[in-house]
Amino acid sequence: MAPVPASTPRGRPTASRSADTRPTTPLAVLAGAVGLEGLALAGIGVALAVDVLVHVTGTPWRASVLFAALAALFVIYGGALLAAARAVVRRRRWARALCVLSQLIAMLMGWQIAEWGVWQVGLPLAVLGVVAGVLALAPQAGGLLVRARTGD
């Protein structure tokens, strides 16, 4: 009697993924860059929310509400970028648009922050935006996200 292959609770085999579903190096770099941006945005959002809660007594209520909304926006967008990074690894088509848009924003913000004199933050942000933007548009990485897959 042949051994039964191990499977997940959903009945899928647990054997290693085939070569066409394993992320290539450019896809892994793209997913890592987008995931890093998502973690940074979510972290900034949480830090901003904590700051709003700590300093709520000495701040006008309108400023508190605005900063709380900004914190929520950062956390939501950071979560969306983390989901896009996961989707890049899984080769989902919808992730490419969010990656390209986010890299354009990162390049522009990096340039602006560097012009403000904080080049230690602006330059790495701009470089990360350029690298991930090129990867999102390159056929070796972003081009793999264009091909239709089942369940997409």
Image: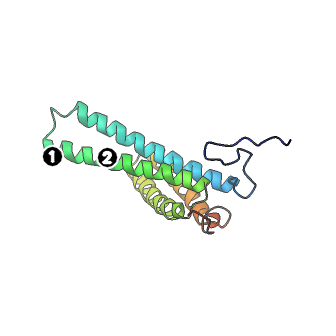
* Residue 66 placement (x, y as % from top left): 22, 48
114 displayed left or right of 149 = left
> At 68% across and 63% down in the image, what residue appears?
140
77 displayed left or right of 139 = left
Task: In the rendered view, tell whether residue 97 sits above or below residue 59.
Answer: below
Q: How is the image coloured?
A: rainbow
Q: Looking at the rendering, which quadrant does residue 139 occupy?
A: bottom right
For residue 12, say whether it is visible. yes
Q: Nearer the viewer, residue 133 or 96?
A: 96
* Residue 99 placement (x, y as % from top left): 51, 59
Query: What residue sits right under mark 2 in the picture?
Result: 72
Crowding at mark 1 (Cα within 10 Å: few <14, some 14-19, many 20+) = few
> At 33% across and 50% down in the image, what residue appears?
73
Query: What residue sits right under mark 1 in the picture?
Result: 62
Of the two numbered discs 1 and 2 on the same chain, state the one appearing first in sequence.
1
* Residue 128 placement (x, y as % from top left): 54, 52
